[in-house]
Image: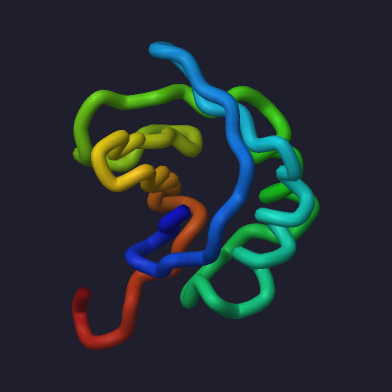
Amino acid sequence: MVVADVNIGTYAITYNMGNVTLKEPSVVAGRISSGVVPNLTVTISQLNSALAKPIPRVNKLGFPQENITAYINENEAKVILIFPKSYLAMKSGGG
């Protein structure tokens, strides 16, 4: 699973054409909020709440939406979670 260009590990999910559901959202939230994803601006509670719901699946990587979305690369068995801009602080240095 990848978040903000950081591989956060391997986690169980279920998915269909419309949604991705994490089997252990609190574990994923804990890993993301442990400091591996820089510039995170939400609390672990907010993150856990967002990850506990079915996450809308997008069919291509693109611009962040208002809520977390998920892109699945089935060839690489990889899930990429795309966070809204409000979840991540802008990086210093203009980028």
Residue visible at 29% across and 47% down in the picture = 76
Image quadrant where one finds the C terminus:
bottom left
How many circles with numbers are drawn on the protein?
Answer: 0
- 87 or 54, which is in the foreground? 54
Residue at the far bottom: name it.
Answer: 93
In the image, residue 87 above or below residue 90: above
Q: What colouring does the structure picture have?
A: rainbow
Where does residue 75 sit, x and y in percent of width and height? 25, 39
Depth check, front residue: 22 or 75: 75
Seen in the picture, residue 88 relative to 22 is either above or below; the reply is below
Residue drawn at x 60%, y 79% as measured from the top left: 35
Q: Which of 79 and 45 is in front in this view?
A: 79
In percent of the image, x 20 and y 39: which residue is there? Answer: 62
Give percent across and percent down for residue 28: 67, 54
* Residue at point 46%, 62% (across, down): 88
Q: Position of residue 6 (x, y in %)?
A: 40, 69
Give x and y (percent) for residue 8.
52, 65
Q: Is residue 28 left or right of residue 14?
A: right
